[in-house]
Image (cartoon, coloured by chain):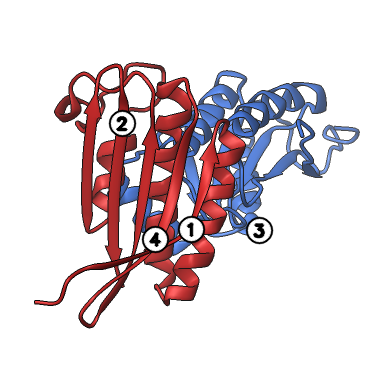
Chain colours: A blue, B red
Amino acid sequence: VGEVSVLRFGDVLVVPVQAELHDTAARDLQESVLTTLETEGVHGLIIDVSAASVVDSFLGRLLGDTAKGARLMGIDTVLVGLQPAVVITLLQLGVVIRDVRTALNIEDGIAMLRRDRSGSEGNGWLAPAGLGLRAGE
Amino acid sequence: VAARVLEPVESVTIVTDSDVILARQRTRELAQETGFTTLDETRIVTAVSEIGRNIVVHSGVVGSISLLRVHQGDKVGLSIVCEDEGRGIDDVDLALQDGYSTIASLGLGLGGARRLVDEFDITSTPGEGTRVVVVKWR
């Protein structure tokens, strides 16, 4: 209890939400994720809820708040893996998860984050590709 | 019209949020046995989660979540009774409104849970406790 395992794919942190998360564990997860974002120095966060068969009002809000917290740290979040039954139930509950983008699965989520980042860098200060300025990042 | 027949299956004592998880798991098992669709199973388990949280967070005392099989004529379903002997709810109508919360929760709990089931009944006496009875037909 209290231990959270996350996956790192390059500059993206993937957080798998466990199947049966009680409220205290959900709060621990939020804190742990935000702390890890800082220590790992990643640029994107993926919250994977494909294993979660229940996302109620509390967990829904907590996931939204985690994304909001990551945003304050300058990190984009993509919520992935919402199951159809969970989606319909969330809508009926009236839960609105704001400030977080969504994708079908982890792969799409990572692609979304990388596209954004390369897109914004392409318009910005980065030197043209091929100069090797990103090496070591 | 045939009478409604209720068959108690089991009762889970609720003290902490871990107990709510246990109640959720038992509810899921019973919903699967009863032959609910995945969607309805999700609705019922989510309702238990919302109502169970109400016991843990608000009542401040021990509560219970009881699961019952229910049938009436050809109809088959599940009934869940959540009880606590906590401080009760002063204004039940207000508590069922979306956005209402006396603590830092979302306030969609009870009102949201009501939308997920077919029947929802709540009685609460300040100082004595709260009882929520829900039914979901297959």
Residue occupied by mark 1: B27
Q: Relative to B28, is B22 above or below?
A: above
Label 1 marks a residue whose chain is B
Q: Circle 1: is it few (<14), some (14-19), or many (20+) Cα within 10 Å?
A: many
Kindly state the secondary structure of the residue where label 4 is placed. Answer: strand
Q: CA distance from mark 4 to mark 1?
A: 10 Å
Q: Amino acid at mark 4?
A: Leu
Q: Are marks 1 and 3 on the same chain?
A: no
Kindly state the secondary structure of the residue where label 2 is placed. Answer: strand
Kindly state the secondary structure of the residue where label 3 is placed. Answer: helix
Q: Are marks 4 and 3 on the same chain?
A: no
Nearer-N-terminus badge (1/2): 1
Of all residues shown, which one is farthest toward the right?
A136
Quadrant of residue B109 in the image? top left
Q: Amino acid at mark 2?
A: Thr
Residue occupied by mark 2: B130
What is the x, y in percent for residue A85? 42, 62
In this view, the residue in front, A129 or B53, is: B53
In this view, the residue in front, A6 or B4, is: B4
Give the foreground label among 1 and 3.
1
User: Would residue A99 be seen by someone viewing this image from the given angle?
Assistant: no
Quadrant in the picture for the C terminus of chain A: top right
Nearer-N-terminus badge (2/4): 4
Q: Are marks 4 and 1 on the same chain?
A: yes
Q: Amino acid at mark 1?
A: Thr
Q: CA distance from mark 1 to mark 2?
A: 20 Å
Kindly state the secondary structure of the residue where label 1 is placed. Answer: helix
Residue occupied by mark 4: B68
Is label 4 in contact with label 1 (beta carbons under 8 Å)? no
Nearer-N-terminus badge (4/1): 1
Quadrant of residue A5 in the image? top right
